Amino acid sequence: MYSLTYKRADSVEEARRLFQEASDAAYLAGGHTLLPTMKQRLAAHDVLVDLTRIGSMKGISVEGDRVRIGGGMTHAEVAGSSEVQRAIPSLAALAGSIGDAQVRHRGTLGGSIANDDPAADYPAAALALAATIMTDSREIAADDFFTALYETALEESEIVTGVSFAIPETAGYAKFRNPASRYPMAGVFVARHRDGSVRVAVTGAGNEGVFRWQAAESALAGDFSANALEGLSVDPDLMMGDIHGSAEYRANLVAVMARRALANLGSAEAII
Amino acid sequence: MVTVTMTVNGRQVSKEVEDRRLLVDFLREDLELTGTHVGCDTSQCGACVVHLDGKAIKSCTILAAQADGTSITTIEGLADGAELHPLQAAFKEHHGLQCGYCTPGMIMSGVDIIRRHEGQLDEDTVRHELEGNICRCTGYHNIVKAILAAAQEMHGEVRQAAE
């Protein structure tokens, strides 16, 4: 890791000021992507602004038909939250399936959303649960947030302070993990909302990152069962292909994971 | 440089370190607590697991500066003097190691697993929970046995104390 200056922020305002004062700063949340990347010298920053002690980015609350989770909440805290388990069990399931126990003790919701790794789990939940991404300056619909691989609608120094998820009528998550990295090679989050609409979000597979599988959404809105997916597939040309699996293989995984997610509705444990 | 102050194995320590100093290097190089190992250095293998405020973390993936003000427990802090921690004793009893390199991380993770599940463990749960710890000797069988045995012993003690 190259030399750097560590700064700890006690408030969102202080974090943004510290970030803007530096020439090439990065925000440090759980650090489980940023620090390994910096250790390999694939990234270098003159200043790291630590967000993990900012009290206003903690907390979980259920407000009406939405669950609001602070950006600083760790995966273990979300997975273990009785509020989340009651309101959206499949979201608790997703959080409890990220990485391993030690990673879940450090990694945060805000960090995952802001990093927008094409194989991260949370972006799938954000899209399928019609989330609103709250930042220190505005609110952004999840549909407008994830713009490309590792790219989001965030401005340079903007901070994800929390995410508000719609509480669905029912939802399920299933993924197929790369056995070495533990990241999904395809993860599908299916949710049927109270207005009858269905959202199906896919992570790990698309060559443009997380995406909504609209054909499946339409089919499931008419018949919310695996039968509705009969004959449906995603275009391999839009899937990632690498040494771990070809685009055709991932396209098949997406269809299989969608069926498994439908078989896992309401469960507080992800199918992995 | 940054001054970090934390409690390590019950003892308060304060040192000036480089901002980029990783917690694992702080423990091993600055405090000479070499029981915490570095296996992969890429957050995969779990040889570097320590407890930060009671929770298992990978000390290769956190800056020492981030741990400022916290309480750290390493493998050196588990035993009570000459008396081994029940999980250390169980690893010895069940031969839960071959080369021993992963053992400190396995034990620190095992203690965390037993704590989080309040001793209520079965083999499948232990195997799943150990996904962040890699044993290159592939000696998982006896590691799992040791964790189950210690969970039972520690849980039994809790039950006795409650009676």
Image: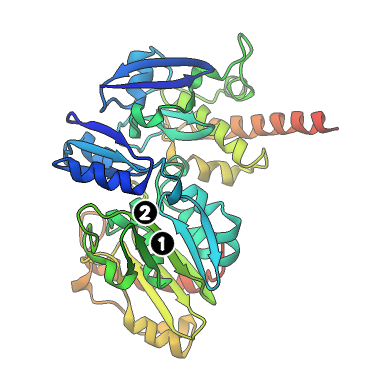
Q: Are marks 1 and 2 in contact (CB under 8 Å)?
A: yes
Residue sticking out furthest to the left: A23
The residue depicted at 40 percent of the width and 53 percent of the height is: A71
Going from N to C along the chain, the mark reached first, 1 or 2, is 2
In this rendering, the count of numbered labels is 2
Residue A236 visible, this orientation: yes
Question: What amino acid is found at the position of numbered circle 2 in the picture?
Answer: Gly
Q: Indicate left or right for A271 with A135 as reference.
A: right
The quarter holding residue B69 reads top left
The residue depicted at 27 percent of the width and 48 percent of the height is: A16
In 3D space, how far apart are the residues under numbered discs 1 and 2 (Cα atoms)? 8 Å
Say which of A164 and B74 sits in front. Answer: A164
Say which of A94 and B11 sits in front. Answer: B11
- The quadrant of the picture occupied by the N terminus of chain A is top left
Q: Chain of mark 1?
A: A
In percent of width and height, residue A7 lies at 29, 34
Residue B20 versus residue A72 in the image, above or below: above
Identify the residue position indicated by label 1 in the image.
Answer: A163
Residue B120 versus residue B18 in the image, above or below: below
Identify the residue position indicated by label 2 in the image.
Answer: A110
Question: What amino acid is found at the position of numbered circle 1 in the picture?
Answer: Val
Q: Indicate left or right for A106 with A119 as reference.
A: right
Q: Chain of mark 2?
A: A
Residue A256 versus residue B44 in the image, above or below: below
- Badge 2: few (under 14), some or many (20 or more) residues near its Cα, within 10 Å? many
- Badge 1: few (under 14), some or many (20 or more) residues near its Cα, within 10 Å? many
In percent of width and height, residue B142 lies at 55, 30
Secondary structure beneath dot 1 equals: strand
